[in-house]
Amino acid sequence: MIALVFFIRYHYNMESEQKNILQELPIEWREYEYRHRPKNGNWFWFVASGALVLIIISILLKNFLLGVVAIAGAFAVAMLGAQTPRKLNYAIEKRGVKAGAHFYPFKELESFWISYEPPHKKELILKSKKKIIKHVHISLGHNNPKKIRDILKKILKEEEYEETFTDILTERLGI
């Protein structure tokens, strides 16, 4: 009987806490999809030089597939570098997180992390249960990261995100 009373109280407290969270939602903002760094001609020469080195290595090793991959990779990196970021609508809603045209339901997310390094880095990182796109990075703009964290902690597990080699490389290259 006592266990039943504790269960009912716990369940009631959880429901009222969920209602309080839902009253704060949605949180909406408009922000660029990533921080833009203008690139000059030197940046493009650097990319071309890296591709040229890989092409020379591929010729010396008689590995022509490496040469083709180097050319395609340099072209892709140059195209990404030349793009300017789009301004997207973001929202944390009752059922999930919206980023532009994409919607990430909470039931398909494992955890979140807020990376906050003022003044340039303030982003929400969502860890998906999907295998292909594992992490989604969302710029928080002028939102209070603590408020977002407090809300998401009640919905998702908070798990520290370790930057990958790809994250570090794209940050350094400015793409």
Image (cartoon, grey):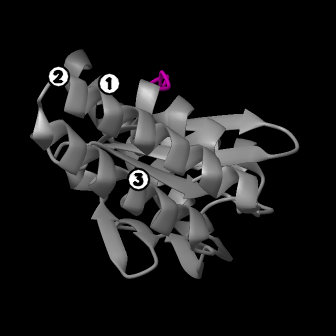
Q: What's the amino acid at mark 3?
A: Ala
What residue sits 29% from the left and 37% below the top?
Answer: 8
Q: Main secondary structure of the magenta part?
A: loop
Contact between marks 2 and 3 (CB within 8 A): the answer is no
Q: Residue furthest top?
A: 2
Q: Nearer the viewer, residue 164 or 59?
A: 59
Left or right: residue 172 compared with residue 77? right
Residue 43 in the image: state x and y as whole percent: 68, 52
Q: Which quarter of the rendering shows the N terminus?
A: top left
Disc 1 versus disc 2: nearer the observer: 2
Residue 10 in the image: state x and y as whole percent: 36, 32
Give the structural element (helix, strand or loop) at label 1: helix
Provide the residue span drawn in magenta.
159-163
Sequence order check, earlier mark of 1 and 2: 1
Residues at marks 3 and 1, CA–CA distance in whole angstroms: 62 Å
Q: Is residue 167 visible?
A: yes
What is the quadrant of residue 128 in the picture? top left
Q: Which residue is mark 1?
A: 6
Sequence order check, earlier mark of 2 and 3: 2
Disc ID at residue 74: 3
Q: Which residue is mark 2?
A: 61
How packed mark 3 is, by other alpha carbons closer than 10 Å (few <14, some 14-19, many 20 or more), is many
Q: What's the amino acid at mark 1?
A: Phe
